[in-house]
Amino acid sequence: MSTMPEGARAATMCVAAVMSMSIGCTSSIDDPVPGAAAESRTGAAVLGEATASVRWNAITRDFIDAKPAATKPNPVAAFRAFAYLSLAQYRAATSADESRGRPPHASPQGAVAAASAAVLSALFPADAAFFASQLQSQENELAGSERAQSAFAAGEIVGRAVGADVVALARTDRFDAVWTGTVPTGPDKWSSDFDPPRPPQLPLLGQMRPFFMESGDQFRPAPPPAFGSPAFLTALAEVRRLSDDRTPEQLQIAVRWALTTGSLVSGFWNDEATKLIGRYHLNERRAARALALADMAAMDATIACYDAKYTYWLIRPYRVDQAITTPVGRPNHPSYPSSHACSSGATAYVLGALFPADANRLAAMADEAGESRLYAGIHYRFDKVAALGIARHVATLVMERDVDGVNE
């Protein structure tokens, strides 16, 4: 593990404050800058003002959004894409900054753009030409300024090298490990809702190499309440009661947080991060750091969540009580814990540590995301509680280690 970067210990204290819903801690990102760049949205005007990292994250969100359902990456693959993208961006911006004083000067924007194109082209090879065109478009915007073109080109050299290193890292993370196991059986065990049954989604994800955790089981929660126990039956009864008496507001929350279209859950939280970056007017390196910490935290929390899911293989509540209705899609993986709450919580807590004035709002969003799964009839309350516990552990670890503490 590398030495803790300056300010990381204070940021860790911020995470602790987020957990207790306090925003009194100090951070390097406190006050919005008057006249700051517009909040991240796609469109030429805003992209022209944004840092390259924000720009390329917007490109990625739009790319995923535009994908038809048949070719859209699954939600976990999307989290992974944003994680490697933002890691490459931070390393590229840092490398470009460190090259100052050694001609030719490498612009961080050129480094981030080239690293982004390299990583995205490797993750989505069928669309490599699209990402190359986006890089070319950014190059063309500098026409007429020889100095800017030269710096951007020097940055591209740095970025391509960083991108290649991150792509090599991604290729060895075991995300694509092939499962040859069988689904366990029993009254408390999950089973596929499809006819004919489909294999569970990513049963080996818990064995993927994390970014910050030592292993997927580092924060494995205790087992859920025993099937049929009073605690289990109480949790099941709550889901049934919510299903029977679901209010219009609860239905709206369940549907709004499903996030199965567009740029998915990962895109939602990535966009939230870029809005904060725009509001606080971060420079390239700080913007890339914020995105990297948030996106990699989401991926690590998801890895930890799936480790637990396929340790316990817990049945979904609507399979125990078939009178429970589900107004959103039924996930093809076990119930305990909630992956939505894991990823949403980890992202929200990290962003809350980075932007403490927004910590309460972000934590409330994560809580609502977890609660939405009870309203939808697809999770027990203990699923949410365990997931947010994982999220807190991951967020604290991420802020302790910072980007330079990423596993290789």
Image: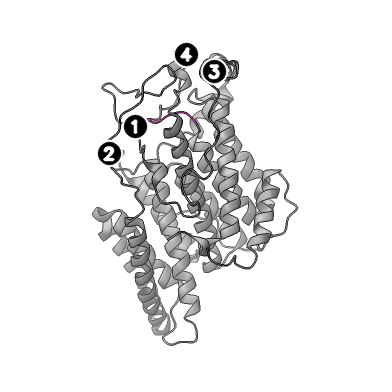
Query: What is the x, y in percent for residue 8?
Result: 63, 62
Going from the N terminus, do you reach mark 2 or mark 1 first?
A: 2
Query: What is the x, y in percent for residue 385?
Result: 59, 33
Secondary structure mostly taken by the magenta-highlighted segment of the chain: loop
Going from the N terminus, do you reach mark 2 or mark 3 first?
A: 2
Type of amino acid at the residue the image marks with label 2: Ala
- Location of mark 4 (residue): 321
CA distance separating discs 4 and 3: 8 Å
Please say if 299 is above or below 48. above
Please say if 277 is above or below 271. below
> Which residues are drawn in magenta?
332-336
Going from the N terminus, do you reach mark 4 or mark 1 first?
A: 1
Residue 4: in magenta span: no
Q: Residues within 10 Å of mark 3 (few under 14, many from 20)?
A: many
Residue 333: in magenta span: yes
User: Which mark is in front, 2 or 1?
Assistant: 1
CA distance separating discs 3 and 1: 23 Å
Helix, strand or loop at mark 4: loop
CA distance separating discs 4 and 1: 21 Å
CA distance separating discs 2 and 4: 31 Å
- Location of mark 1 (residue): 200
In front: 26, or 174? Answer: 174
User: Which mark is in front, 2 or 3?
Assistant: 3
Q: Residue furthest right?
A: 24
Residue 70: which disc? Answer: 2
* Badge 4 vs badge 3, beta-carbon distance below 8 Å: yes
Mark count: 4
Q: Residues within 10 Å of mark 2 (few under 14, many from 20)?
A: few
Type of amino acid at the residue the image marks with label 1: Pro
- Location of mark 3 (residue): 236
